[in-house]
Amino acid sequence: MKRILVFAIIFSGLQSFYAHSQPTTLINPILAGFYPDPSVIKVGTDYYLTNSTFSYFPGLPVFHSKDLKNWKQIGNVISRPSQMNFMGHRMTRGLFAPSISYHDGLYYVVCTLIDTGGNFVVTAKDPAGPWSDPTFLPEVKGIDPSLYFDDAKAYILYNSDAPDYKPLYSGHRTIRMYEFDPVHRKVVGEEKMLVNGGVDISKKPVWIEAPHILKRNDWYYLYAAEGGTSVNHSEVVLRSRDVWGPYQPYERNPILTQRHLPADRKDPITSAGHAQFVEAPDGKTYAIFLAVRPYRDNFYNTGRETFIAPVEWIDDWPVVDPVHPELQYRYPVAYGETKQADARPQSGNFQYTVTFESQLDPSLLFLRTVDSTSFNLTKANGLTVTLKPETCMETGNPSFIGKRQQHLYGSAETALTFTAKSDHEKAGLVIFQDERHFYYLCKSVADGKNVVQLYKSPAEGSAMELLAQVNVPSGAVLLRISAEGERYSFRYALSPGKWSVLKDNVDGTFLSTQVAGGFIGCVFGMYATSSGQETSNKASFRYLKYEGKDPVYDQR
């Protein structure tokens, strides 16, 4: 019996080793959907990653991985309204470009609260949180800060203004640095400019930003984004023997870009940049960066997403994937993967259902802050929200709880229980880009009858445009919004599986970043409003089901 038990233990261990040691494939994007400006660190055998969230709340998600492939959201850096809120901010403002780091048992995130507050630092003993209240750094004037710890000293570097606030051209910026006191969370000494304009100021480079420093073989590598965060985006690198410089640029910059490739190539990945290097489990270097997947031209609705690619060191310079002219959707690696329990998939094609029985999933998003008195969760009714007078066309906190659109071809579905008392009251699903770019599939009343309606956000003013309407009986209704590249369709059902089209082939380019501007991607939102009127009415959402199936993953 003992021999059998020992054999079983050995066999189980061999199975675990075999499963974890088999080669796997990294699938891009590793975080699909609106996850821009990634920052990543390795602590022991663990990886932690965070992204920009702009004016969504909670802010700055924290993901954990063991293999750079499977990521699980374990918390949010800005999780309490007492830390900060974004009331009055447009959705594309708020929190820009966080950077996460670790030193001496403490995790740090530095970030920019654009427009109000500026740069700040927060800390935590556990990356899952709770994170501290922010300490603002008034001397650090600019955006995209990052911390670099070098033995006993620390430094904060960031994008800042042109010398003497006199830009030579539009987009002329600098990289500057202070020494940083991590104990008292303040800068030390004098600011120094490390980079003026970019790698070659004679070529008028624009928007040198998102800087990081890496030390390797006694070289300090300063790498940063350049070219702006659209199709001309890139990553460049400079190096020095001294952390304060002078920094000399790599003669073959940029080390990452897609701007030179044909715009009409199949399944393009574009706008690549804003990278951070990290060591993989096999000891090799990888870059994690933002890029986008347009469905045509420069139209995309999924926002800037988080990608990965291998880095090769050539003559002591890092170059991102020198083997392939085009970034790849799949990168085979020599090490095995480590899946995490209860982690939702984040890459490739996938589906999941969010239920509302006891607590909200940490990936769900509110507009600007959270009002815990406006919703509750029960096993019987799911998510019940109180209708608020605020609408998503304003800069307040309406009754809105959303989940990112993570595929070019995907859908979101919910079961809604709601009876409107007037035509001001509406509840349903919204596909939301920003305050002026959304479609709203909702239940309401019109001429005393229950209806399902489809609205388009107004270009100006506060009145939405009614696109379609159908009478429905009282009772629960199922709602579904489907993304099909540059088109969306809107359906309803009175019983499971029996879908009726309210309107299809609706223009999706209206929801693209190209049309709306800004830096965010689309979110499917459960949204209820009384449109400026006071009410005590409520709406209940039983679940939120998401399905995504992009053809690119079937073809490769």
Image (cartoon, helix red, strand yellow):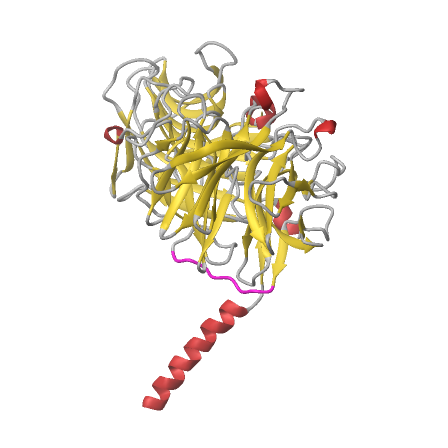
498 over 507 or under it: above or below: below
Picture quadrant where residue 476 is located? top left
72 over 485 or under it: above or below: below
312 over 501 or under it: above or below: below
What residue sits 50% from the left and 39% below the top?
35
What residue sits 50% from the left and 10% below the top?
460
Q: Is residue 379 left or right of residue 255?
A: left
| Residue that sits furthest to the front in the current view | 189
Residue 83 rendering spot, x and y as whole percentages: 31, 32
Residue 111 visible to an observer of this rendering: yes
Number of marks drawn = 0
Picture quadrant where residue 372 is located? top left
Residue 500 visible to an observer of this rendering: no
Query: In the picture, which quadrant includes the N terminus?
Result: bottom left
Which segment did they paint magenta? 334-341
Residue 335 rendering spot, x and y as whole percentages: 56, 64
Of residues 215 and 542, the one nearer the viewer is 215
Q: Main secondary structure of the magenta part?
A: loop
What residue sits 71% from the left and 41% below the top?
253
Confirm whether the magenta stretch covers residue 539.
Answer: no
Residue 203 rendering spot, x and y as whole percentages: 74, 28
Q: Is residue 371 left or right of residue 408?
A: left
Residue 395 rendering spot, x and y as whole percentages: 39, 19
Of residues 530 and 371, the one nearer the viewer is 371
Confirm whether the magenta stretch covers residue 338.
Answer: yes
